[in-house]
Image (spheres, grey):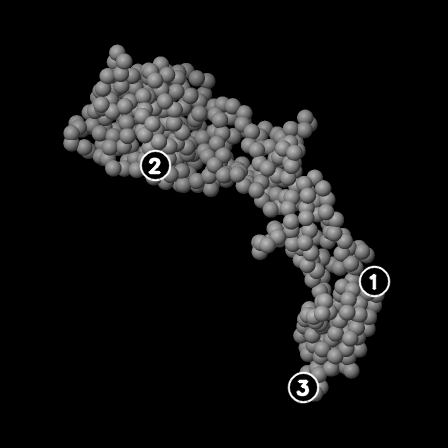
Amino acid sequence: MRQVLIAIFVLITIGESFAQNRILFILDASNSMNARWENTTRWDVARETLSKLLDSLEQSPNPPEVALRVYGHQRNFPPQYCDDTKLEVAFHANSYRHMRNKIKGLRARGTTPIAHSLEEAAQDFPDNSNGRNSIILLTDGKEECDGNPCKASRMLQEKGIAIRPYIIGMGMELDDIASLDCVGRTVNAESPAQLAHEMHLAVRYALLPTSAQVDLLDHRGNASETNVAVSIAEQFSGKPAYHFIHTLNRMNRPDTIMIDPGPVYRVTVHSTPPVTREHVQINPGKHSHIGVNLPQGDLSLNIKPDGAYIDLRAIVRELDKKTIVNNQTIPGKHRYLSGTYELEILTLPPITQTVEIKAGQSADVKIPGPGTVTFQANASFYGHILHKKGNEWVNIYTFNGNNTRQVLAMQPGEYRLIYRSIASKSIHFNREISFSVNTGGSTLVKIP
């Protein structure tokens, strides 16, 4: 005889607001449900527990809409009829009464097509995204039709129809529990009374409001970091659920958000660079803390004199990584995760510098102010500016050959202009001019 298994799958579709809560109950009416359980049968316990739960829901202040799908009730086992699943009571105004009447007349007869029933259940809800749709599945055992409930659950999650399952087992073996871990969370009921308790918890899981706060932790582990954008999305479907600017309230604590406890979430903090926490689970009916390590420091970039450049920027990369994490304005200050960064300051020539940003501190980088160099020629020319970098001369600028006068802001240093008139067609007409640049200075380079 198989171990008794009562599985409750809570699969929630999230909209921006919930105009209506809906619960689809899927009832296992396979032949094995006729097995004894204490002084009655699994089937009688399941029907009685579900009927009492319906009474409780109907009497609640804002009762959800309900519907009933049943499997294993249309044909006897053996043999196996793996398409034996049917929506017996659809969502409508009188569905509570109809469900109670339908449950009384059902008989447990057939097999257990769990995966197929989950797939079919996706079509049972009204075509209205402005609602919260839940599925509670009651079954006494494992999949019997070579279906894959884990795959079906994942598929529903990826499509945004089914969220995290809630599984309640009774007298389950460890192997049975492990086989359902890929489907969702599991608990074990040891008696009909505990089954009723777990079913009420499943409804609570699906319906009750739940709160959470995102704790952005500094280098001391305190939730003091704030004023950064946070995105919370469903882990499997990627569907966005919440976006907000993190705030500390008047008590210097992170603000509370109301959150749906059904999905598994991915939490992304849009710091520089961003930080992501995967597979975040929320406790239904409770207040959850979502902690994200976010030790930050400031990078201050300044240049003297101010206004020497128009829209000067620094490309910021994590050290030894090619990905750009920011394009910082100069002068200016920006907040980064603690770590070591490579700066490419887009002066002429560019300045490359490594800087360490420590948590709770400010790294100050002062950039030398440029000088002004005017290139004035009697005729159009081909030319390159070479910069002395150590013992090497590096090309930093190429003239396009169309202008006879050009003004450039250049960093202090030693330079050479190598040029040739466009009209000249021999290497013998190549010339070079050496010049230097000082901060705030003005240099005229005449090209004969």
- Pointer 1 residue: 440
User: Which residue is rendered at x = 54% and y = 41% of the image?
Assistant: 276
Please state the horizontal and vertical placement of residue 193, each as a whole percent of the image.
35, 14
Within-10-Å neighbours for mark 1: few <14, some 14–19, many 20+: some
Q: Is residue 397 left or right of residue 267?
A: right
Spatial CA distance of label 3 from label 2 is: 75 Å
Q: Secondary structure at mark 1?
A: loop
The type of residue carrying mark 2 is: Cys
Spatial CA distance of label 2 from label 1 is: 69 Å
Q: Of callouts 1 and 3, which one flags the residue occurring earlier in the amino acid sequence?
A: 3
Please state the horizontal and vertical placement of residue 257, each as a whole percent of the image.
56, 30
> How many numbered tags mark residues here?
3
Question: Where residue 150 is drawn, which disc sits there?
Answer: 2
Please state the horizontal and vertical placement of residue 114, each as a whole percent of the image.
29, 32
- Pointer 3 residue: 427
Q: Nearer the viewer, residue 29 or 337?
A: 337
User: Which residue is rendered at x = 65% and y = 44% of the image?
Assistant: 338
Asked if residue 411 is positioned above or below residue 406 in the image, the reply reads above
In contact (CB < 8 Å): disc 1 and disc 3: no
From where the camera sits, is residue 270 visible?
A: yes
Q: Secondary structure at mark 2?
A: helix
